């Protein structure tokens, strides 16, 4: 089943692959695939004459544990030059221990680096109703991982989106098509420095 969800976007002639490794926020949940920020990334790369293709291995509902369990297979298939890790939101929504999430994401980062890929960690935030201690520790975990493993870092995937209700689908969890370019802009700030032309 994983193979069916592993979507290749763009041409096969590119010298490098960017592997996007996330959950529903990167899997274009509720949208046409072409509307999601990952598909928009392919277009931006082409316009900027960056010689990369994009592989999206994001799965809706994925947790950091699920991501850690399949990272080896995903790396073997994509052979990426860059891995964009956007997991963690579902751990937070389920109130799972932050230390557990950090350990799982650390496994993903380490495996990616051992495969000689550059890594970009994209952070997440939880609503305040999860309590100040949990929300703080959760958000800080991503920066701590980036510092520990010396990766690229984006503080918040939904920066500029999360506080705008009109940019969310009726479930109030998944951004609309109109939000996707804003999400791409957030990711691009951390991704662009990792790319070569």
Image (cartoon, rainbow, N blue to C red):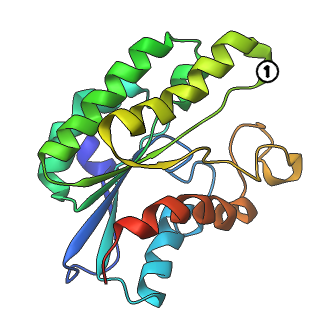
Helix, strand or loop at disc 1?
Answer: helix
Q: In this picture, is 28 found above or below 62?
A: below
Q: Residues within 10 Å of mark 1 (few under 14, many from 20)?
A: few
Is 80 displayed left or right of 45 in the figure?
left
Residue 163 in view here = yes
The residue located at (79%, 15%) in the rendering is 129
**Going by the image, does 170 lie left or right of 148?**
right
The answer to which quarter of the image holds residue 32 is bottom right
Residue at 28% over, 81% down: 11
Question: Above or below — where is 126 with respect to 43?
Answer: above
**Residue at the location (21% across, 59% down)?**
80
Image location (x, y in percent) of residue 179: 72, 60
Q: How many marks?
A: 1
- Residue denoted by label 1: 128
Eyeballing the image, is 160 above or below 54?
Answer: above
The quadrant the N terminus occupies is top left
Left or right? Give the position of 182 relative to 86: right
Which residue is located at x 42 percent, y 86 percent? 46
Whether 29 is drawn above or below 111: the answer is below
Q: Where does the image place residue 107, in percent across and percent down from the top left?
A: 25, 28
> Horizontal and vertical percent for residue 159?
70, 50
Image quadrant in which the C terminus is located:
bottom left
Quarter of the figure with residue 147: top left
Can residue 32 be seen by looking at this rendering? no
Q: Which percent across, then down, holds residue 37?
A: 56, 63
């Amino acid at each position: 089943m994983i193979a069916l969800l592993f979507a290749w976007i763009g041409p096969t002639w590119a010298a490098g692959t960017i592997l996007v490794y996330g959950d529903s926020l990167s899997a274009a949940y509720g949208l046409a695939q072409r509307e999601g920020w990952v598909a928009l990334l392919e277009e931006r790369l082409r316009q900027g004459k960056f010689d990369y293709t994009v592989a999206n291995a994001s799965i809706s509902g994925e947790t950091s544990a699920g991501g850690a369990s399949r990272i080896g297979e995903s790396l073997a298939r994509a052979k990426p030059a860059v891995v964009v890790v956007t997991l963690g939101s579902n751990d937070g929504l389920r109130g799972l221990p932050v230390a557990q999430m950090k350990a799982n994401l650390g496994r993903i980062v380490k495996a990616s680096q051992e495969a000689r890929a550059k890594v970009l960690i994209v952070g997440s935030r939880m609503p305040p109703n999860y309590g100040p201690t949990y929300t703080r520790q959760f958000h800080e975990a991503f920066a701590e991982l980036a510092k520990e493993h010396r990766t690229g870092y984006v503080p918040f995937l939904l920066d500029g989106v999360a506080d705008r209700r009109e940019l969310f689908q009726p479930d109030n969890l998944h951004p609309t098509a109109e939000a996707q370019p804003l999400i791409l802009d957030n990711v691009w700030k951390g991704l662009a420095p990792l790319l070569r032309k």
